[in-house]
Amino acid sequence: MVTVYEKKPGHETKAGLSRRELLKRGGAGALLIISGSAVISPEHAWGLETSALKPETMATLIQVARDIYPHDQVPDKYYAIAVKGHDETAAKDPAHKELIEKGTSELDKKAGKGGYRGLGWEEERVALLTGIEKTPFFQAVRGGLVVSLYNQKEVWPIFGYEGESYSKGGYIARGFNDIEWL
């Protein structure tokens, strides 16, 4: 039995499915599967193995990251890469592991039945995050995302950013005088 988090427009539900049921459901919405020490998205062909944090914690961090810096055009895999650093830090620092595990656990408790990922509306999740924005947990996650999400070169084209300009001759000959937006 695997734990499946099914993402559909406007909500996410948790269901225990057998392998047969999972295969029968196929493409019914985006799925995040938590199995063993991994979070897997079979629909989008990516997985995230965890070493120190629980896979459920990582799945929650992915959703928290998406709610803190929401970009509909950015796939979950880039959010997963962005929060992977917390797992790596937790493997070396027991205090960080406790901060992240306890923070996600408290967030799930505040969310009620189904936990944070089970909340159906983004507004509900954002309200919970607003309530904890001064906590060390929130600050650690938000602070790490600023660098870990936006420094991924694979994400830059999604935002229309071409990268640094020095190696390409600077901006003077590459769009400095473009005023198409006027």
Image (tube, grey):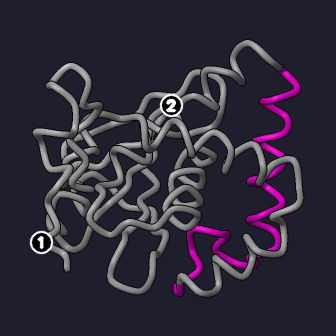
Answer left or right for 106 relative to 120. Answer: right
Residue 182 on the magenta span: no
Residue 87, picture quadrant: top right
Say whether disc 2 or disc 1 marks the residue closer to the N-terminus: 2
Element at label 1: loop
Q: Judge depth for marks 2 and 1 and give the one in front.
A: 1
- Residue stretch rendered in magenta on the structure: 94-121
* Image label count: 2
Q: CA distance from mark 2 to mark 1?
A: 49 Å
Answer left or right for 24 relative to 101. Answer: left
Quadrant holding the C terminus: bottom left
Is residue 169 placed above or below 63 in the rendered structure?
Answer: above
Residue 47 is situated, as x and y percent measured from the top left of the image, at 33, 37
Residue 96 on the magenta span: yes
Residue 126 is situated, as x and y percent measured from the top left of the image, at 65, 77
- The secondary structure that dominates the magenta segment is helix
The residue singled out by tag 2 in the image is 37
Query: In the rendered image, is residue 1 in sight?
Result: no
Q: Residue at x 45, y 35 (%)?
A: 38
The tag on residue 180 is 1
Give the residue type at disc 2.
Ser
**Observer-nearest residue: 23 or 61?**
61
User: Callout 2: 10 Å neighbours few (<14), some, many (20+)?
Assistant: some
Answer left or right for 178 relative to 124. Answer: left
Q: Residue at x 37, y 69 (%)?
A: 6
Is residue 117 placed above or below 61 in the rendered structure?
Answer: below
Residue 108 is situated, as x and y percent measured from the top left of the image, at 74, 65
Give the residue type at disc 1.
Glu
User: Callout 1: 10 Å neighbours few (<14), some, many (20+)?
Assistant: few
